Amino acid sequence: MPDWTVKDIPPQTGRIAVITGANSGIGYEAAKALAGAGAKVIIASRNETKGNEALARIRAATPDADVAFEALDLSSLDSVARTAERIASTLPRIDLLVNNAGVMAIPDRHETEDGFEMQMGANYIGHFAWTMRLLPKVFEAENPRVVTVSSLAHRAGRINFDDLQWRRRYRPWPAYCQSKLATLLFSLELDRIARAEGWKLKSMAAHPGYAVTGLQTTGPRMGRDAPGSFEFMMKLLEPFLSQSAAAGALPTLFAATSPTAEGGVMYGPGGFYELKGPPVRAKIASHARDKALWRRLWDVSEQLTGLQTPLPATA
């Protein structure tokens, strides 16, 4: 896949894509590229004003773009259920489900309305519930894909089942790393289940490397009035190690659209330490390849959300 770009995206006419957190950053760039290639795109994000602004920008770039906004708060299982129900009632199928939204390095511990630590809740548990509720529509597609955005941070992540919600001693970066490891494990286990059950579904992960987006500021400033040391450090590194949001979206887009993309793997930038560059098959840390860990997290996630894995109607 040498120097794969948006120009290599196959025609997407007739495909329906649902993308979380697509009002900015790599999610927006993925939504714009998919709409430009002919897909019908649903942007599911929390901020309606920013969502409508994203729709306007996409339509300015592609006047005949078929794009729509759905309000979604991934930190609320009730919001996840209501939005998934709305989408399921209006769409005939979902060809492409992109689990993209995320928040990073919140300096102080916050909880979702369901009592989950905010990063674990919004980045992972909300997406788990979202996917479980939309899988029946995904099953209706001919060749569906679920692309889940993870991070290089998964390499430093550990799943602390004894204190999954960081109630004993909260640490911002380890909490983020755990949440992004969880998204990767989810993607791998979903693909394993799909293969074992003989489903047509492909599940794969992607990571953007170091892409400059609002992720570097939104989380670190949550509950604070001024930038902290983490944000300052990221700003210093940006000129040397980062790439644009558009470039960071390429691994997601490759996973979503390339005929050669495989299930059960992760795609990321091909440059130094996978921080930037064209998309390639990314390295998965050895501890993230433990299938027993995949299954344990899946079982815990079903318990936390009260949801079980749906089956295709024909199963």
Image: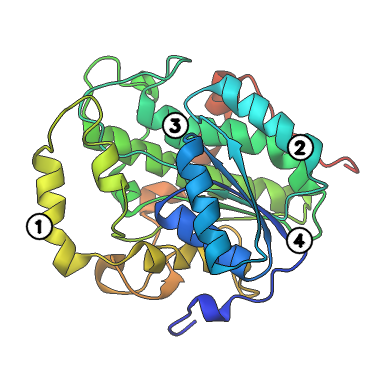
Quadrant where the C terminus is found in the figure:
top right
Q: Which residue is mark 4?
A: 143
Residue type for callout 3: Ala
The residue tagged 1 is 236
The residue lying at 41 percent from left, 41 percent from top is 102
Q: Which mark is residue 88?
A: 2
Residue type at numbered disc 2: Ala
The residue tagged 3 is 122
Q: Earlier in the sequence, mark 2 or mark 4?
A: 2
Distance from disc 1 to disc 3, alpha carbons, whole Å, reads: 28 Å
Mark 3 or 4, nearer chain start: 3
Q: Residue at x 38, y 37 (%)?
A: 179
Disc 1 residue type? Leu
Alpha-carbon span between mark 3 and mark 4: 28 Å
Q: Are marks 2 and 3 in contact (CB under 8 Å)?
A: no
Lateral position of residue 33 relative to residue 81, left or right: left
Distance from disc 1 to disc 2, alpha carbons, whole Å, reads 44 Å
Is label 3 or label 4 in front? 3
